[in-house]
Image (cartoon, rainbow, N blue to C red):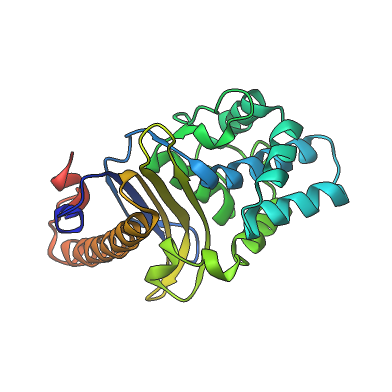
Amino acid sequence: MLEPVLRDYDTRLAVAVLSLDDADREIASASYRGDAEFNTASVIKVNIVAALLLQAQDEGRGLTTEEQQAAEAMISTSDNDATNLLWRRIGRREGLKAANDRLGLSSTQGGSGARWGLTRTTAMDQVRLLRSVFTRGGADSASSRQGLNPASRAYIQELMGHIAEDQDWGVSAASSRWALKNGWLQRTTTGLWVINSIGQVELHGHRHLVSVLSSDNASMEDGVSLVERAVKAAIGAVSAHARQRLLGHATGSSDPRTAFERGGD
């Protein structure tokens, strides 16, 4: 399904999508190389805010003014100084791991030292993170006590819905109703770009949680174009699969695999 998207691109790409109804029930899901590892670049900032909020919940407190200002700058304008502050505040990679154990992210490893942007993750793990933020029950493996509470989820959703205009790309290419965080990083060793986008879009009456990770892009512009094409193709495939499932239920037969899964690696 993504072969046309990848044509003329010498790059790595992974996509995961989960579509939900208003009651947070899964309508359809799909992935393309969803377990392949990529550097997060700045999409890790959503995970850092989630870890910060979990720690604040455990301490029975709200965020301090300093933490709120840093969280808002980190998400809305992707401010790196604010990220450095909160990365230290959560306990760096150890604090991230503690949070992710609770949220069900089993394939995300924090970057060493101060290198939060070199955290390794998968498209599937990023959708698990999005599910912990955008559904009422949190991550599949976390109880309401372990996961983000309603106030924490609402706070992250609010932050991701107010991104600086020049960072309105990626997931938002699929719909005017979105909440997102993007990441971009030029690797010094190769000059090539990591371009990622995660978030929620609302389209055709459904909510889609989407993660697109890519690396080895020749330029930021090429990477953004690739990610946006992948987002549209992914949501299109999931929407088609959902329709097929409904038709299959009506006729008594359906293939449970998605178009992405049948395409495989």
Q: For the point 66% across and 63% down, which residue is it?
A: 158
For the residue pair 94 and 103, the one nearer the viewer reads as 94
For the residue pair 155 and 92, the one nearer the viewer reads as 92
Residue 151 position, x and y percent, is 73, 55
Q: For the point 38% across and 40% down, which residue is it?
A: 191
Q: For the point 57% across and 23% down, which residue is it?
A: 112
Q: Is residue 23 left or right of residue 163?
A: left
Q: For the point 22% across and 66% down, which residue is it?
A: 240
Residue 85 position, x and y percent, is 75, 39
Q: Quadrant of the N terminus?
A: bottom left
Residue 15 position, x and y percent, is 32, 49
For the residue pair 262 and 52, the one nearer the viewer reads as 52
Q: Is residue 18 left or right of residue 237?
A: right
For the residue pair 100 and 47, the one nearer the viewer reads as 47
Compared with 14, 232 (above or below) is below
Compared with 153, 121 (above or below) is above
Compared with 175, 50 (above or below) is above
Residue 79 position, x and y percent, is 66, 51
Count the numbered circles shown: 0
Kindly indicate the quadrant of the structure image that contains residue 77: bottom right
Q: Quadrant of the C terminus?
A: top left
> Is residue 222 visible in the rendered structure shown here?
yes
> Is residue 63 visible in the rendered structure shown here?
no
